[in-house]
Amino acid sequence: MRSDWLNIIKSFSKLNVLIVGDVMIDEYLSGKVDRISPEAPVPVVDVKARVHRLGGASNVALNCKALGANPILCGLIGEDINAKTYLKLLNDSGLSSEATVFSSSRKTSCKTRIISNNQQMIRVDVEDKHDLNKEEQNALKAMLKKHITSNLDLVIIEDYDKGCLNQEVITYIEKLCSNHNVFVSVDPKKQNFSYYKNVSLFKPNLKELQEGVNTHIDPTSNTSISAAINLLNSEVQKANHLITLSKHGVFYRTKAGEAGGYPAELRNISDVSGAGDTVISVASLAMQSGCSLAEASWLANLAGGFVCEKPEVVPIKSEELINEIARLEYGK
C-alpha cells in the first residue's frame, strides 16, 4: 500500500466533483409503542422525534464534501413542501442548490421510516419513478452541459431507478465527459445497467451485479465474480470494476484484467445504510488523485466499514479516514 495517504487525501480538496442522479429526503419518525389502535390491529406510535436527512445522490455529495472535495449536486425535485425541506437541508449542509432542476409535475422523493425501540416498523415512500418528460430532460441536460464543461474533474452518477436517469441522459453525460476528459464513475441499478457504455469506474454491489447479468454469484469466489463481470462486459464496454460484497468485503478488476479483493474488517456493525455511497465517493476521489484501482479499493473498503459502525447514515470525514489508516497500518 501507499506511504503517502495523507497527501492523497489532502489532494481531494483540489477536485471539483459533479454528482448527478436521484436525490431524496430520508425522514425518520421515532417514538414509543404502548397500545394497539382501536381502528385496526396495528400498533400506535407516539412520535417523540422527527429528523430529516439528505438521501440518495445527496449523500454522495455529503461524503465528497466531508472528504474535502468540492461537490456540485445535480438532481431533480418537485415544487412541493418536500422541496422546501430538501433545499433547507442542502443549505444547512453547506451544499449549493445551483445545479438543482425543478419540475412542477414531479414529487420530491421522500422516504419516511417509522421507528420504535430502535426497530424500523414501516417505510412510506412518496415519489415519482416514471421517466422524465421532454421538458424535464432538456432542463437536466442543459444543467449537465453547464457544469461538465466548466473546470470539472469528476462525475459520479448515482442511480436509484427513480427516473432521473435514462438512456438518453446517460449517453449525453458520457459523451460530454469523453469530450472534456472527465473521469466518470457509476453506482448503478438494474433498470439502466446496460446503458453505461463508456465509464471509468463501475461500482455495483453484489445484488445489483447479479440482477444486472441475471446469474447467481458466489461472493467468496473470485472466479465466480470475474465470470459475472465477463457477462457484464458483453453489455458494458470494459471499465474498471469495483464490486461491494457486504460482509465479504470488495472485489476489483481493472480494464486490463488485474483482479483482487479485500475482506471486510471485523467491526461492530450498527447500520450498513449509506456504506455504498461512502465507497463510491472514496474510490472515485482516490483514483482521480492518482491511486490505482487496487489502492482505491483498499481505501474505499476501509471507509465503508468505518461508516457501518455509525448508528445512522453519516459521511466519513477526511480526518476520520486518515485516523483509520493510521490505526490499521501503524496501530495508532
Image: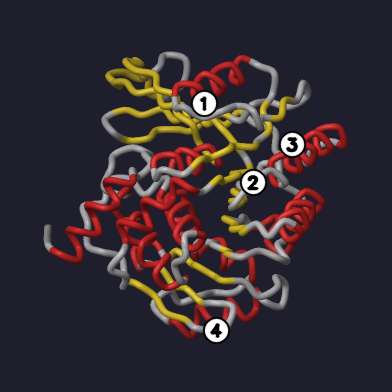
* Residue type marked 2: Asn
Ranked by sequence position, the earlier of labels 3 and 4 is 3
Q: Residue at horizontal 47%, vertical 71%?
A: 293
The relative height of residue 160 versus residue 325 in the rendered view (above or below) is: above
Observer-nearest residue: 16 or 125? 16
The residue beneath circle 3 is 143
Task: Name the side, left or right, on which 51 lies relative to 138.
Answer: left
Which image quarter: residue 196?
bottom right
Q: Amino acid at mark 3?
A: Met
Q: Which mark is residue 90?
A: 1
Q: Is residue 75 left or right of residue 121?
A: right
Mark 2 or 1, closer to the camera? 2
Residues 294 and 212: in front is 294
The disc, 2 or 1, on the residue closer to the chain's N-terminal end is 1
Q: CA distance from mark 3 to mark 4?
A: 36 Å
Residue reaching furthest left? 332
CA separation in Å, label 1 and label 4? 40 Å
Name which residue lies at 62% across and 71% down.
239
* Crowdedness near tag 2: few (<14), some (14–19) or many (≥20) residues, C-alpha within 10 Å: few
Rounded to the nearest angstrom, the CA distance separating label 4 from label 2 is 31 Å
Dot 2: element: loop
Q: Which mark is residue 10?
A: none
Residue 150 falls left or right of residue 305: right
- Gap in Å between the C-alphas at discs 1 and 3? 18 Å
> Pointers 3 and 4 in contact (CB under 8 A)?
no
Where 64 sits versus 23, above or below? below
Q: CA distance from mark 2 to mark 1?
A: 22 Å
Residue 115 sits in which quadrant?
Answer: top left
The numbered disc on residue 151 is: 2
Residue corresponding to mark 4: 257
- Give neighbour class at mark 1: few <14, some 14-19, many 20+ (Cα, 10 Å): some
